[in-house]
Image: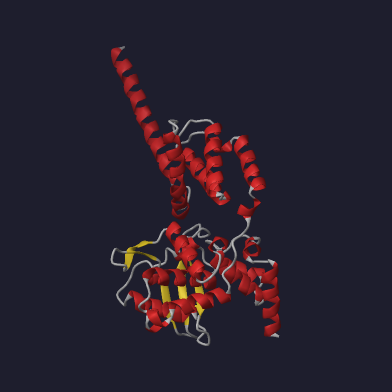
Amino acid sequence: MESQSLDTVSTAQGQKSELSLGLEAAQHYLSKSVRSSTKQQYDRVYGIWRDFCCRNQVPEFGVGHEHLAACLSLVMMRDQSYSKVVMLSASIANEHRIRMLPSPTTHETISTLFLGFRNEHPETLAAKLPITEEILDKMYAHLYQTQHGRDGLRASVVLWRTVWRISMEYHTLGRFSDIVKLCRKDVNYVTDPSPHLRILFKGGKNDQYTEGGERVVASNPDVKRCPVQLTLNYFRFLGLSYDGYLVPLCTAKNSPNPAKSVPYSGALTDLKKLMNLLGYDEKLYGEHSGKRGGATTAAAHGATDKQLKRLGGWRSDAMPAKYVDLSIPSRLSMSELLQKKV
């Protein structure tokens, strides 16, 4: 009888150990349920919830929806950013999901709260303006000004990475998360059948199977803002032996750090400073402005939704139209472009 009892205890311990191992494995796989780029965005805002809980002496997990509603409302009042509270709520839901815990984000009160945010602050939902050809011209002119030396080779790392990133978003319809992952080996200059860049995006939002997707950027030597020439000059600026990230962080000596790419917050700050310097309202431009600009210009020159979908790497037929700016100034500009073509 005693031997049977010990066997039962041993079996129970083995089952418990197996269950614990299984739960740990489940948490690991759940933590991989979102892409690294999305996880980085979550990590940037989740600290807001953690700090809120710490200041108010409530646990991060297991609290009611009332605490979450209070936190989200304070963030909305302070920052006036609908996208920020959406991202914060998503990050909290993700952390609960990983731990297999019920999330306060699913409560009806929270969805109603977001409705209130949208009604009270409709201006926060307005899409950011697109980068235009005029803005690109000014960016290139600023980079290539005399004080920055021949071909901009004495300009700063921050200016180079910002102008190059925006130009690539514009000409490839790539996302920030696509461009910021690019290393030197991913961008190649090819002369056959005509000069162009071949750019390999891998691990992007729409690259579900990590197969990668190639984009091609044609050379246009007749204009000063040729993206291919810009890239070749950037390669010279970085140095022939450089093999790291093409949107790099800066070292203490203001040189590019090949091992680390600039985070979203830093890149957005760079863009806003540059827009302000060029005489534009920095609040009207954001992460998708480069991609919106490229899509809008391509549409103005006659690109079809099918062509935009392929160029932008979208899986949904509806997405290209969301990136084409159809404001009155934009439609007037499209009309002028089409008349010039005729």
Residue drawn at (46%, 80%), measured in percent from left and top? 228
Rendered-image quadrant of the C terminus: bottom right
Q: How many marks?
A: 0
Quarter that holds the N terminus: top left
Q: Classify 149 as above or below 246.
A: below
Q: In which quarter of the image is residue 289?
A: bottom right
Q: Is residue 63 above or below residue 336?
A: above
Q: Seen from this angle, which residue lies furthest bottom?
A: 222
Asked where in the image residue 72 lies, by quadrant, the reply is: top right
Colour pattern of the rendering: secondary structure
- Vertical arrangement, residue 230 with respect to residue 319, above or below: below
The residue lying toward the viewer, choosing from 69 and 26, is 69
Q: Residue 160 location, x and y as percent?
A: 41, 72
For the point 56% across and 50% down, the residue is 81
Q: Which residue is drawn at 53% across and 73% down?
A: 171
User: Is 61 placed above or below 141 here?
Assistant: above
Whether residue 172 can be seen here? yes
Q: Where is residue 223 in the image (x, y as percent from the top left)?
A: 52, 85
Say left or right for 220 vs 334: left
Tell me if I can see residue 197 in this picture.
no
In the image, 75 versus 170, the foreground residue is: 75
The location of residue 190, given as percent across then percent down, is: 44, 81
